Amino acid sequence: MKHIDRGEFVPGKPGSLWDMLEVKAKPFVEAISKLASMSAMIRTLNEHKPEMPTVKIDKKTGKGLEALLVPFIESCGPLGAKISGKGAERIVQMLKERSLNYVELGVKFETLNQTFRDELESSRLFALNARAADCFALATETFGADVIDKFPDAEHDLEEAGKCLATARNTATVFHLMRALEVTLQFLCGKLSITNTQRVWGHLLSDLNQKIDAMAKGEQKSRWAAASSYLWQVKEVWRNETMHPKQTYTDEEAREVFEASRVFIRHAAKLV
């Protein structure tokens, strides 16, 4: 579980307009369901076994309950359920002190469940399937550490491209990829001693091709030529259209650009 840094709005810092939480779905859902199950079990015990209310929670049972509460507590703060988190922490402390009996624990679980529901009334939870979650990750994970090592200035846009793809912000995905590829183009030009790399793509690619044409025949020249050819295609097919205010992309188109860009930038990282 972690906060996602979305650029200028830094989660957890004063003044941030919003806060986003990445929650591992399985442990969080298990914690919630087990809390509910435990509440129901305790109610049943209290109803059918009169002796249970006075029985203190033993050490082994307490540790098991604590294990259920930990992922719940970790989720509460970022979700805005701070009161629920504090309440769960107090239950954990009482379990460690072995100061709770079953009826007291049942009451506390009921209160905790109700408080948590109240605090989440204004929150909205979203889920990513496995395919989307793979994109919603650090750039070092989606593109590779070697890529980020070679093109550090592209890291932010590569990471944002993955997050946008995962959340179906398709045009933004392509926009960030074009920015990252521009950084890559400028870097490649610099490696071949091409100056003034802030010029438009067309001029840079023309200069890049002249340098490549002057290389001796061999594998290295072929690899550079392949990189240049890809960037020409990007310029003609995607880049110019991306900068047009009416251009939009479907899920499939954005993923196609993403995957193609990933293949290219990994290829480019091996050139330098």
Image (cartoon, rainbow, N blue to C red):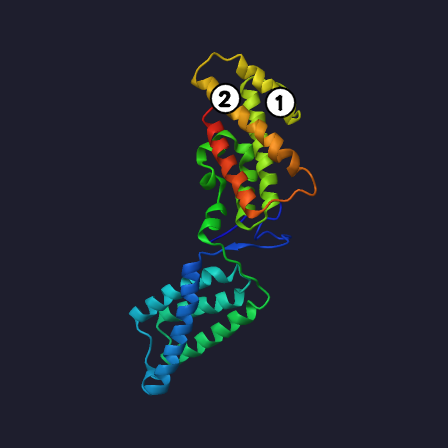
Residue 65 percent coordinates (x, y): 36, 68
Quarter-wise, where is residue 209 in the image? top right
Q: Residue at horizontal 50%, vertical 68%? A: 84
Q: Which label is found at residue 117? A: none
* Label 2 Cα crowd, 10 Å radius (few <14 / some 14-19 / many 20+): many
Residue 174 percent coordinates (x, y): 59, 40
Judge by depth and name the residue closer to the eye, 115 or 201: 201
Q: Secondary structure at mark 1?
A: helix
Q: Residue at horizontal 44%, vertical 56%? A: 24
Q: Amino acid at mark 2?
A: Trp
User: Which residue occupies the extreme right position in the image?
Assistant: 245
Judge by depth and name the residue closer to the eye, 63 or 3: 3
Marker count (numbered): 2
* Label 1 Cα crowd, 10 Å radius (few <14 / some 14-19 / many 20+): many
Q: Residue at horizontal 50%, vertical 21%? A: 224
Q: Secondary structure at mark 2?
A: helix
Does the image show residue 7? no
Q: Specify which label sits upstream in the sequence, 2 or 1.
A: 1
| Residue on which disc 2 sits | 224
99 left or right of 203 in image: left
Judge by depth and name the residue closer to the eye, 158 or 205: 205
Examine the rendered structure and indicate whether residue 34 appears above or below residue 243.
Answer: below
| Residue on which disc 1 sits | 204
Quarter-wise, where is residue 239 in the image? top right
Q: Amino acid at mark 1?
A: Leu
Does the image show residue 267? yes
Residue 191 percent coordinates (x, y): 53, 20
Residue 225 percent coordinates (x, y): 51, 21
- Spatial CA span between label 2 and label 1: 14 Å
Q: Residue at horizontal 44%, vertical 52%? A: 130
